[in-house]
Image (cartoon, rainbow, N blue to C red):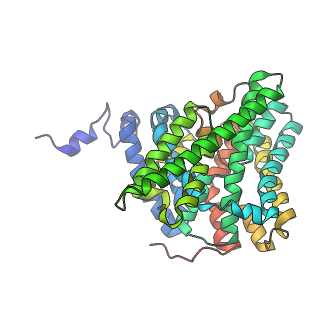
């Protein structure tokens, strides 16, 4: 009988335990091995250096990426995109179940802050890049992407440190609002870039279709979860329904050129409103969702890039500093009217900093950003990728520092 270890070690042309063997291994096997390493390394870093686990997962992805060891090529991840979209969808749906839209009506200053912090961050980044020599179309594209805070990073950190308080609730609300704003603005940008003449009517019609269609799709999915949930028994039935409806919503939204992000947020809000305490949403929908979450952060690390940062660093710095300035000014200006203390204000500004590529990736067919922005200046796009890399890789640290130290809303926990 062939020894199993010798069989595994000789998959491919080279022994699997060598670097060349890992590079020639099947992508499925390579990703599985990287997931094992990511879990172990993340736990070690969390125990001994207090580094958030998502940072460890992304770090393994960076080490395996073309930046360092070239164990996996970015194009090999395209086959995994449906599963990764599901991982993102699970988190976005959970975000929808955790926000309270009624709060925006009861606190108009908070509603204005949610709108202003994203818009002002985008405007400052657009203006800064344009002043540094980038054309207006490309500067606007970068400003739009810079509007949003990463829902994926925000929820991953919240699962780990379990904070409760004003800053946490506002962070969730603002993350949802600025992500939707970025998504809608990107739809408008695509129409304007494609038409060339900036036809207002076609742009408005496209935006209206995206908003109305996405809200309707999300509402139907939320209502279906309520109706079907009342007719099934068993504690495991609701999570299965959630995953199935999330998958259906993503596929239909992409097919109908709607926004998966907005549809899933609305589905979460409607499901929570209808089912109330009858809706139990486990973090990442339990262990299967947690495994998808590890794969998601690992792949985010594989996609990170710092190419040409030596020559593009002024634009990279303008994107990072511009969005920090824009969000900071908006939050500070409306902090007192919305009922927030100065220390909480500082914590909220820091927690909003992790930049998101979600508005781009969830609606894309592949992980190649250049194909999503036809006509955009390649240098501006590369600077945006580098800025996103830096803010995503360090993002869990920003959020953890904000919620554990600046506004201590998380319980002090000794690493298990």
Image location of residue 345, percent across then percent down = 78, 68
Image location of residue 306, percent across then percent down = 65, 41
Nearer to us in this view, 414 or 45: 414
Vertical position of residue 150 compared to residue 45: above or below: above
Vertical position of residue 101 compared to residue 47: above or below: above
- Residue 24 lies left or right of residue 131; in this view the side is left
Determine the residue positioned at 38% across, 33% down: 24
Determine the residue positioned at 77% across, 73% down: 343
- Residue 211 lies left or right of residue 295; in this view the side is right
Furthest toward the right, the residue is 131
Determine the residue positioned at 67% across, 40% down: 212
Determine the residue positioned at 66% across, 49% down: 390
Looking at the rendered image, the quarter that the C terminus falls into is bottom left
Instruction: State which quadrant residue 126 falls in.
Output: top right
Vertical position of residue 372 compared to residue 344: above or below: above
Instruction: State which quadrant residue 272 falls in.
Output: bottom right
Q: How many numbered badges does the structure rendering display?
A: 0
- Residue 310 lies left or right of residue 35; in this view the side is right
- Residue 19 lies left or right of residue 388; in this view the side is left
Image location of residue 412, percent across then percent down = 56, 77
Nearer to us in this view, 389 or 370: 370
Nearer to us in this view, 84 or 36: 84
Residue 242 can be seen in this image: yes
Residue 310 can be seen in this image: no
Looking at the rendered image, the quarter that the N terminus falls into is top left
Instruction: State which quadrant residue 109 falls in.
Output: bottom right
Furthest toward the left, the residue is 1
Image location of residue 127, percent across then percent down = 87, 41
């Amino acid at each position: 009988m062939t020894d199993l270890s010798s069989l595994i070690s000789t998959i491919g042309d080279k022994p699997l335990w060598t670097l060349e063997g890992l590079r020639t291994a099947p992508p499925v096997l390579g990703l599985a091995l990287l997931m094992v390493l990511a879990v172990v390394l993340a736990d070690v870093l969390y125990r001994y250096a207090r580094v958030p686990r998502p940072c460890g997962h992304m770090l393994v992805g960076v080490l395996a990426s073309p930046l360092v060891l070239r164990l996996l090529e970015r194009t090999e991840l395209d086959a995994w995109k449906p599963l990764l979209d599901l991982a993102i969808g699970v988190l976005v749906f959970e975000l929808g179940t955790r926000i309270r839209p009624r709060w925006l009506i009861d606190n108009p200053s908070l509603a204005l802050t949610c709108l202003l912090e994203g818009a002002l961050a985008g405007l400052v980044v657009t203006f800064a890049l344009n002043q540094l020599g980038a054309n207006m179309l490309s500067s606007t594209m970068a400003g739009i992407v810079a509007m949003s805070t990463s829902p994926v990073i925000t929820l991953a950190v919240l699962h780990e440190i379990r904070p409760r308080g004003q800053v946490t609730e506002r962070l969730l609300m603002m993350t949802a609002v600025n992500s939707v704003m970025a998504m809608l603005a990107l739809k408008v940008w695509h129409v304007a870039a494609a038409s060339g003449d900036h036809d207002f009517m076609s742009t408005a019609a496209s935006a209206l279709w995206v908003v109305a269609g996405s809200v309707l799709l999300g509402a139907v999915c939320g209502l279906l979860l309520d109706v079907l949930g009342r007719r099934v028994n068993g504690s495991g039935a609701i999570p299965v329904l959630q995953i199935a409806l999330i998958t259906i919503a993503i596929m239909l939204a992409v097919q109908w050129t709607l926004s998966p992000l907005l549809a899933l947020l609305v589905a979460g809000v409607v499901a929570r409103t209808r089912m109330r305490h009858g809706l139990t949403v486990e973090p990442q929908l339990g262990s299967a969702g947690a495994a998808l979450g590890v794969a998601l952060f690992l792949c985010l690390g594989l996609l990170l890039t710092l190419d040409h940062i030596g020559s593009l660093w002024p634009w990279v710095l303008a994107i990072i500093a511009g969005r920090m300035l824009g969000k900071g000014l908006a939050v500070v200006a409306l902090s007192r009217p919305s009922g927030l203390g100065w220390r909480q204000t500082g914590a909220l500004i820091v927690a909003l900093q992790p930049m998101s590529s979600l508005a781009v990736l969830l609606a894309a067919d592949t992980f190649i950003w250049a194909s999503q922005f036809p006509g955009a200046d390649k240098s501006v796009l590369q600077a945006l990728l580098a800025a996103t890399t830096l803010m995503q890789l360090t993002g869990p640290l920003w959020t953890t520092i904000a919620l554990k130290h600046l506004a201590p809303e998380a319980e002090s926990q000794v690493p298990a």
